[in-house]
Image (spheres, helix red, strand yellow):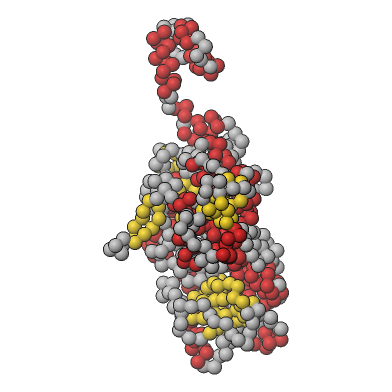
Amino acid sequence: MRPMLPASRMTVCTDSTFKSWKVFLKVYFHSGTDWNRAPRAVKTEKTLLLLSYNNWDDYTIRTTFNAAFYHEGKRILDFSLKLLIENDTNSPVKLNALCKEGWDGYFPIPDTNYVSVPSDIEFYDALTTKLGVPEARKVLLLVRDAGYLLNILQDNAAEKLIEHDHFATSPLREAGARKSFHDGWKAFSGNSQSIQDFTLNIPGRDVENVNPVKFRFNSDTLPYDINVLIGPNGIGKSHTLKNLVAYWLGVAAGSHTQLSKSKHQPFDVNPNISRLILMSYSPFEDFVLDLSNTTLKDKTAYKYFGFRRGSTSALGKRQSTISRNLPASDSVESIFKAMADDDAYGFLSTWTSKFKTIMDVLQPALGFEKISIEVNPKAELPLSLKAHLIKGKDEKTYIHLTPVSHPKLLKLKDELFNAINTKAGVIFLNGVERLDLSSGQRLFVYMVINIVGQIKAESLIIVDEPELFLHPTFEVEFIALLKKVLAAFNSKAILATHSLAIAREIPANCMHVYRNGQHGLEIDHPPFETFGGNMQRISSYVFGDSKVTKPFAQWIEDAVQEAGSPKGLLAKLKDEVNEEMTIKILNSSVVDGR
């Protein structure tokens, strides 16, 4: 709900208004056309928000600026700022022109109506952490932050620009900016940030037929943090996930061009998620590998994990290769990213340590003492790392990974991944003894590390068939670990599965059952509560078990016929039957019924 309307809905901020403030952080535009670098520091200002030219084009609308937040002389955040100016389609060129006309580059832009959206929601946390909320509000007024002006101040001039088609075409084109616009202002209103429920509209066989899937992530009673798509093979679960990825990112069928042609409305409300992480360890999946071939500026909004990796052929064509070592090598890259993110964003007041999360989640489950990586036998390491080396009982050398050893490893730069054996994955040690994990344990441990390495607050994790390579106990354990990660980062998950062990952990309102109906695909919820429910009942409803003749049931029918009666078969089997089979034999359909 928006706050009460102020006396005036127009935020009148004249130059004299800003001069009367003792604004701690100024906003400055570097004129020029050098687009491929972060804005350089200004010697006279130690704390500054800097903008510079960028030539990025969003369907002929250009609003992108390179941006950097300097605090006490240190650059603490790089991002992009989308700035839309009224009656203009090329904001960087417009600001250059204003500078030539005498503008000194310091915000606010004189005599101009404009709104802006940052590419990363961390921008708001960085402002409040380093400047405090009152000063951060002043900065948002200088850049005329669209979400803040619309939802907090209810600024008429801003609302006019926000309602213009150009605002959706350019400032809101990328997922990170949409997240910032939707949720960034909440840090200044007392509203909590969380992923909201949304409905995905899946196109049917004809234009008018749409299958809506309502994903529910919020409940005051049962845990709604995970939604499940369940049903037989080939029914469309993976197709749903592909559509969700394409529509949220705005690529392929979800691109601006395609949606304009099809007139399809993919969501009831745009999902307010900050990053989408997809995992699929099936050799037959064909999900999007990365965003390298897209026209999106932010290539990090989506991350894929699986057995495939994108590569370039000798002819320069994009192709994918399959390797069973990828989950292990990805885990090494992910744990380095986790520690790098802790270094880069640890100053944020709301930051959750990724390395600590990995330790807190996995240590109770595995019972290890140290996380490490294996050193290649011929690697030459600097003396600074000697104190962090461990000679294992297996005669192999390991580096103990800690927040202290990590910066020293980074000094190896390009030589880092030549010095370590990434194919061995992340290693767990008790003393000098390597923890022996089964292939299934290794996979779900790698999955957890890979998720934490890439996750941001309010991310959506998609896992296609997590039960592959995991027996039922590991399936349940993976769900337990996943829930801990989701809670730590205020994130949600969607799983496509056939697993009844997983289904029993999911409330009915979060379980989407796929089946073929008279008029095509039908998607509904079980009419009974599945959370902690009976797996046989769930199986019968989801897969129609009662309608399929089981091999053992057919064997009983044949054996009774051969024995002449149910009692004759029981006498023949003696103690080779259990109670359930005895009942089925006695209830079998024979002519004499004896």
Residue 393 seen anywhere in this rendered image of the structure: yes
In the rendered image, the vertical position of residue 310 relative to residue 148, given as above or below = above
In the rendered image, the vertical position of residue 294 relative to residue 593, given as above or below = below
Query: Residue 196 versus residue 29: which sits nearer the camera?
Result: 29
Q: Residue at x 41, y 13 (%)?
A: 559
Could you tell whether 528 is left or right of 165 in the image? right
Q: Residue at x 34, y 61 (%)?
A: 312
Query: Residue 57 versus residue 488: which sits nearer the camera?
Result: 488
The location of residue 116, given as percent across then percent down, is 56, 74
Which quadrant of the structure image shows residue 488? bottom right
Q: Quadrant of the N terminus?
A: bottom right
The location of residue 507, given as percent across then percent down, is 59, 41
Which quadrant of the structure image shows residue 102? bottom right
Give the number of marks.
0
The location of residue 453, given as percent across then percent down, is 55, 57
Q: Residue at x 57, y 90 (%)?
A: 104
Could you tell whether 495 is left or right of 239 in the image? right
Could you tell whether 119 is left or right of 128 in the image? left
Residue 86 seen anywhere in this rendered image of the structure: no
Query: Residue 296 versus residue 517: which sits nearer the camera?
Result: 296
In the rendered image, the vertical position of residue 98 relative to residue 261, given as above or below = below
The location of residue 135, given as percent across then percent down, is 69, 76
Q: Residue at x 45, y 48 (%)?
A: 280
Residue lying farthest bottom? 102
